[in-house]
Amino acid sequence: MNDKRIELVDGDITAINVDAIVNAANNLLLGGGGVDGAIHRAAGPGLLAECRTLGGCVTGDAKITKGYRLPARYVIHTVGPVWKGGGRGESELLASCYRKCFALAAAHKINSIAFPAISTGVYGFPKQTAAAIAIRETRAALRDDDGPARVIMLCFNRESREAYEAALRQDSRPAGPVL
Ligand code: APR
């Protein structure tokens, strides 16, 4: 298991010096509140100007831009699902966000990437469930020594950190045969 390549960091994603930071955006990709607002404020107007050329982003997908005034070279914008109780494919859409971000990281030879807790703020996704999805998809991306050398999960509050710590304690080996 490559959990040693997964780090939990408390603080603001805009200050993290990695190849790419992930933005929890909305379908318009024109900025917003939360981490989206923080990233656009820190990156400056060039980020919005480039986002305007992207034609939006469907939920579960991701698009990449430069990082502008951010320490990070790239911003990967992904649109997580709004939590509607769990019966509308929310978990699969959130998993897709992580898979699409890792696919863009591979395509752009990104060696270090930092994620916010996608969908767990305004979009209301339960933090424990979201963290389990994030860790499961990250472990899958790092299997066979593929994927970035460093994956950072930003913990913007205590609840997020505890959710990731619980998810990391879950063993990722497939369950053995039912005896
Ligand atoms: N750095 C790291 N994490 C942050 C930061 C920050 N500067 N600001 C907020 N967060 C955390 C929140 O605490 C939450 O755990 O990011 C997580 C995602 O929360 P939101 O930013 O609300 O994103 P999300 O729930 O995916 O909702 C997306 O919010 O801002 C709008 O335009 C955005 O419409 C979109 C929606």
Image (cartoon, rainbow, N blue to C red):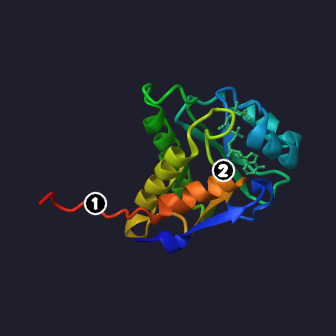
What quarter of the picture does the C terminus occupy?
Answer: bottom left
- Viewer-side residue, 90 vs 67: 90
Q: Position of residue 36 (x, y in %)?
A: 75, 40
Is the residue marked by circle 1 packed among few (<14), some (14-19), or many (20+) residues within 10 Å? few
Report the amino acid beneath label 2.
Pro
C-alpha distance separating marks 1 and 2: 26 Å
Report the amino acid beneath label 1.
Pro
User: Dot 2: what SS?
Assistant: loop
Which residue position holds label 2?
A: 116
Task: Name the residue located 55 percent from the left edge and 62 percent from the top edge.
Answer: 165
Q: Is residue 43 visible?
A: yes
Task: Name the residue located 53 percent from the left edge and 25 percent from the top edge.
Answer: 84
User: Dot 1: what SS?
Assistant: loop
Q: Position of residue 14 (x, y in %)?
A: 79, 54
Q: Is residue 114 visible?
A: no
What quarter of the picture does the N terminus occupy?
Answer: bottom left
Which residue position holds label 1?
A: 174
